[in-house]
Image (cartoon, rainbow, N blue to C red):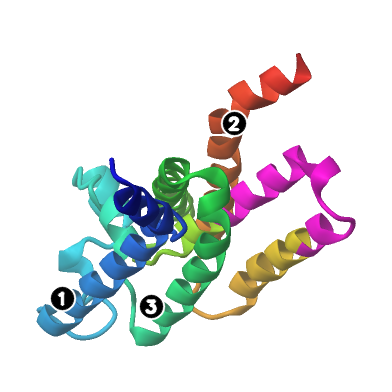
Amino acid sequence: MNESATQLKRKLNQYPAVTIVLIGLNVLVFLISDLFAPETGGDRLYTYGVAEWQAVFEQGAYYRLFTCMFLHFGIEHLINNMLMLGALGFYFEHGIGSIRFLIIYLGSGLAASLGSCLWYRQMGESVSSAGASGAIFGILGAMIIVLLINRERIRDGFIQRVLFIAVLMIADGFYTENVDYTAHIAGLIGGCVITVLLLLPRIWKRKN
C-alpha cells in the first residue's frame, strides 16, 4: 500500500463510519416508508415491520424485532433520534471500535424491542413500537460501562455527569407521551450487558 493510500485510510478511520451509515439507513427507510406507506394514522407503518407482541409471538413475525429499529413515527421522532445517535456515535465509536459499536447498537436494539414486546404482552396491551431510541440507549449504557471500567483515567465528575444524563433521558421517557420507556430501559440494560461481555477478556487481563 502506497503512502497516499495509507493516508486516505487513516483519514477515513477518523470518521465514525458505522454511525454515519446507521444514520443514513434510518433516513432512507424513513423516506421510503413515509412516501409509500399504504395507510395513514398510527398503524401506517405496520406493514413495514413495527414491533407488536401479537405479531411477533402469535404470528411468528420475529423479524419485527429488528425492522422496528429503523422505523420512525414522523420526522420529529427521526430527527430527535438521529441527533442523539450522532452525538453519542461521533464521540464513542472511535473509542470502542466500529465492529463493537455495531454489535452493541444492534444487540441493544433487539433487547429493546424484545423487552417492549414481553412487557406489553404481560400487561395485555396492544402497542406498536418503533424507533432507534432503544439501540441509542444501549450505546449510552455501553458508554457508562466503559467509563466505569476506566474510571481511574477519567477526570473527576465526568462519570457522574454521564450518569445524570442517562437518568434524565430515562425520566424523560416516563413523562413524555407515546414514548416506549420499557424499550429504553431494556436497551440500556442490553447495552451494558453486551459491553461487559465484549470487554470481558480485557477486564480479566487487566485484573491478572
Gap between marks 1 and 2 measured at Cα: 37 Å
Residue type pointed to by label 1: Ile
Q: Which disc, if any, is residue 32?
A: 1
Question: Spatial distance from mark 2 to mark 3, Cα to Cα?
Answer: 31 Å
Reading the image, the residue beneath label 3 is: 78
For marks 3 and 1, give the CA distance.
13 Å
Residue 136 percent location from the top left of the image: 50, 60
Given the image, on which type of amino acid does mark 3 rest? Leu
Residue 89 appears in the figure: yes
Residue 38 sits in which quadrant? bottom left
Q: What SS does tag 2 mark?
A: helix
Look at the numbered discs 2 and 3 and tell me whether their residues touch, using CB distance below 8 Å.
no
Mark 2 is on which residue type? Leu
Q: Nearer the viewer, residue 15 or 121?
A: 15
Q: Residue at x 43, y 73 (%)?
A: 82
Specify the principal SS of the magenta part. helix
Q: Which residue is mark 2?
A: 199
Front residue of 9/160: it is: 9
Q: Is residue 129 above or below residue 193?
A: below
Element at badge 3? helix
Residue furthest out toward the top: 208
Q: Place residue 31 in its image quadrant.
A: bottom left
Report x, y in % for residue 190: 53, 43
Dot 1 falls on a residue whose secondary structure is: helix
| Mark 3 vs 1: CB contact within 8 A | no
Q: Which residues are magenta?
A: 139-161
